[in-house]
Image (cartoon, rainbow, N blue to C red):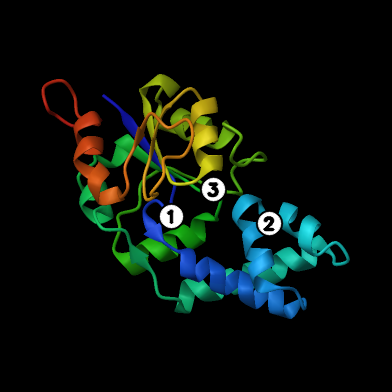
Amino acid sequence: MKYVLFDVDGTLIDAVSNQRRVWGTWAERYGLDADEVYQVALRTRPMETFAQVAVDHDPRECLAALHELEDEDVRSGVYAAFDGASELLHGLPLKSWALVTSNYEHRVRGRFLRTGLPVPGVIVDAAAVEEGKPSPVPYLRAAEQLGASPGDCLVIEDAPSGVRAGLRAGMTVWGVNATVAVEGVHRHFVSLREAVPHILALASGPDGSAAV
């Protein structure tokens, strides 16, 4: 039996255009090159991004502006779940899976509401941990809240930092939604849809019953 721990953006929900738009608007406010800022933001957490691209500005002010734009995007932006996400999440018992995100819970709930995805009982967000991905802490925290050992957890990720976090936590890591496999993943799927039957099968017990 496996407990399944999902990343959110890029794994279950296609938020690339939303993230690019938010960071683009943020960059315009500070007179920065939008493409350059976005490329840095893809690799780092917000405070680290500000330290690289907006060294002359108060990082707390930068973060407040970013949060304002992100919250507005959750209210008015267009979101889509990846093909297979709804079938997959509805096929898993509520207590057998969790979300582990570098975003904030209220935004995740807003996006899930907009896309019709079910919300699990365990969500580990940016406010829940001091160390974000690629630290193993977020995934270990989710396993603890589910009452699962790391060895019984399957991580579903799309990004290198998340993959490293899952591997460092001692978990099985599968990569999705990428043409080329992220280094270190135990299995790679070009799309989430392709991975759905395999995730559901692994999350089932030896008799075919779902893990609880």
Can you name the residue that lies furthest to the left here?
Answer: 207
Location of mark 1 (residue):
10
Location of mark 2 (residue):
46
Decide which of 109, 185 is in the foreground and name it: 185
Q: What kind of residue is marked 3?
A: Asp
Splitting the image into 4 quarters, where does residue 189 fall? Answer: top left
Of circles 3 and 1, the one toward us is 1
Q: How many residues crowd around disc 1 within 10 Å: few (fewer than 14), some, or many (20 or more)?
A: some
* Up/down of 154 relative to 177, above or below: above
* Up/down of 172 relative to 18, above or below: above
Splitting the image into 4 quarters, where does residue 13 fall? Answer: bottom left
Q: What kind of residue is marked 2?
A: Pro
Decide which of 3, 85 is in the foreground and name it: 85
Compute the Cα span from label 2 to label 1.
Answer: 17 Å
Residue 152: which numbered mark, if any?
A: none
Q: Secondary structure at mark 2?
A: helix
Decide which of 60, 177 is in the foreground and name it: 177
Q: Is the C-beta separation of discs 3 and 1 under 8 Å?
A: no
* Up/down of 79 relative to 159, above or below: below
Location of mark 3 (residue):
125
Instruction: Give percent across and percent down for residue 165.
Output: 54, 34
Circle nearer the N terminus (2, 1): 1
Instruction: Give percent across and percent down for residue 205.
Output: 18, 24
